[in-house]
Image (spheres, rainbow, N blue to C red):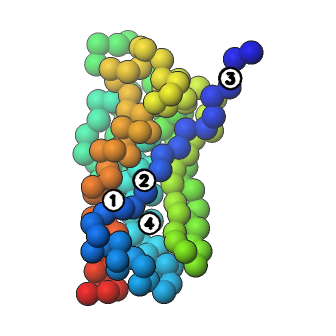
Amino acid sequence: MATTPTPVSGVIKITGTKELIKKLKKIDDFRKLKPAMDAANLVLWARMGSYPPYNSAYRSGSRSFSRYRPGSSYQRTGTLGRSWKKKPVRVSKSGIRGGVQTNLSYAPFVQSSKWQAWMHKPWWITEEQATAQEEKYIVSLFEAAVNKLIP
C-alpha cells in the first residue's frame, strides 16, 4: 500500500550563536518576539508561494509569479502559490512557533523534498531548500529582536 504524502511545511529551529541562545533563555515573554516570527513567516510564505523563475521580491513579502515558465507553453493558474498559508503564531512560556503550509493535494509532488517529481526538480524549490536558504536571514531577524530586548 502506498503512503499518502503529508502537507508540505517548513521548519527553522533558531539555534544561532551561543550569545543568542544565552539571551533567548533570558526572555520572560516570548510575545515580544512575535514581530520577528511574523516577518519570518512572511518571507517563507512568499518564498514557497513564488513561481520559477524566482526573483528576490519574496524578501519583502511579495510573491513572484510568471504566467509561463520559460520554454513552456503551459499557462499557470497560480493555484499552488495561493494555497500556501501562514500558520498562526503560537506563543508559550518556553518559546514561539510559526510556519507556513499548504494542503493542496498535488503540492508534495511539486515542492516537497521527499515527494518532488523529477520533472519539477530543475524548477521548483522545496520546503527544505527554502528553509536552508532563508535560515541565516531568519536567524538575523530574531537576533535583532532579541538584541533590542536584551542589549
Report if the CB atoms under discs 2 and 1 are less than 8 Å apart: yes
Q: Circle 2 sits on which residue? A: 12
Q: Specify the farthest residue to the right.
A: 1
Q: Circle 4 sits on which residue? A: 37
Disc 1 or 4, which lies upstream in sequence?
4
Disc 4 or 2, which lies upstream in sequence?
2
Residue 31 lies, with reference to residue 61, above or below; the image says: below
Which mark lies nearer to you, 3 or 4? 3
Report if the CB atoms under discs 2 and 3 are less than 8 Å apart: no
Residue 13 makes an appearance in the image: yes
Report if the CB atoms under discs 4 and 2 are less than 8 Å apart: no
Using residue 41 as the reference point, say whether residue 1 is left or right of it: right
Disc 3 or 1, which lies upstream in sequence?
3
- Splitting the image into 4 quarters, where does residue 87 fall? bottom right
Q: Amino acid at mark 1?
A: Ile
Q: Which mark is residue 120?
A: none
Q: Nearest the camera: 104 or 137?
A: 137
On the image, the x and y values in percent for residue 37 come to: 44, 66
